[in-house]
Amino acid sequence: MDLVKCPFCGIEIENDSFYCDQCGEELRICPSGHGFKKGKICNECGTKLVEAKSSAGNQTQADTKPQATTASAPQATTASVPQATIAGQPPVADVPAQQPEAAEKTVRPTAAPIEPKCLVSSALNATLDLKDGAIIGRKAGDFVGVFANQGYISGTHARLQKNASGVWEVVDLDSSNGTFLNGQKLAANQPAAFKIGDTIAFYDVKFTVS
């Protein structure tokens, strides 16, 4: 680094100083190259002095070469592709979104009623298995053993049968003391349908349909 004298105090300082290291004065320089000078005008060429720091800044800017501006190459416009294609495979066509199918209505078959199997009497401790055409009577029929000692039961009191629809019926055979379904007396020779849980009484002998 070259040394030059401070124009204020005469002490040698570095030639790139902005201030004197000894006296602290701000240094001015001749733009024409006559070095540091005192005052506002160069005493050698009469050129107006400038601050050393300003001169250094201008020099730095002058030394710095502007960089060539590189025109930015236009970017290639890539056409939008609906779906990514895989090498070696044909592109997949867009598939329209499927609308949710309406929930299928479940049709459940109507449960068939449970078919009666027998008549049960707790008073007689007896069970009569249902038979199509079976006769209830004290002297005739399929259950004489049950009704033989029942004096109010007619000889041929009633009949159990299935109709064309498969429904069980009871028919009073013009008995002396009547046949009752759920407490209602039946007309003679008129079939009456019954189901599980009903009560059939031959006069006062009650049976529950099971």
Image (spheres, helix red, strand yellow):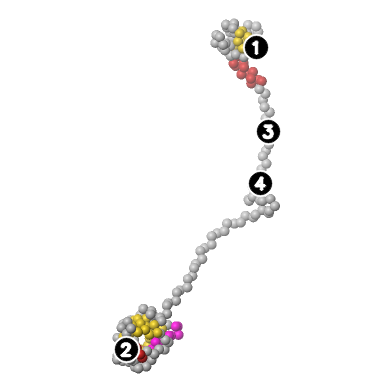
Q: Earlier in the sequence, mark 3 or mark 1?
A: 1
- Foreground: 29 or 151? 151
The residue wearing badge 1 is 2
Q: Earlier in the sequence, mark 3 or mark 4?
A: 3
Residue 169, label in figure = none
Instruction: State the SS at label 3.
Output: loop
Residue 163 position in % (x across, y down): 43, 85
Q: CA distance from mark 2 to mark 3?
A: 119 Å
Image depth: mark 1 or mark 4 in front: 1
Image depth: mark 4 or mark 2 in front: 2
Label 1 close to label 4 by CB (< 8 Å): no
Residue 74 position in % (x across, y down): 67, 38
Q: Please, is residue 197 above or below residue 89 in the view?
A: below
User: Which stretch appears magenta?
Assistant: 157-166
Q: Residues within 10 Å of mark 3 (few under 14, many from 20)?
A: few
The amino acid marked with disc number 1 is Asp
Residue 79, label in figure = 4
Instruction: State the SS at label 1.
Output: loop
Q: Quarter of the image containing the N terminus?
A: top right
Q: CA distance from mark 1 to mark 4?
A: 64 Å
Residue 178, label in figure = 2
The residue wearing badge 3 is 71
Instruction: State the SS at label 4.
Output: loop
Please report the residue visible at 31 percent of the width from the left and 91 percent of the height from the top.
Answer: 149
- Foreground: 53 or 183? 183
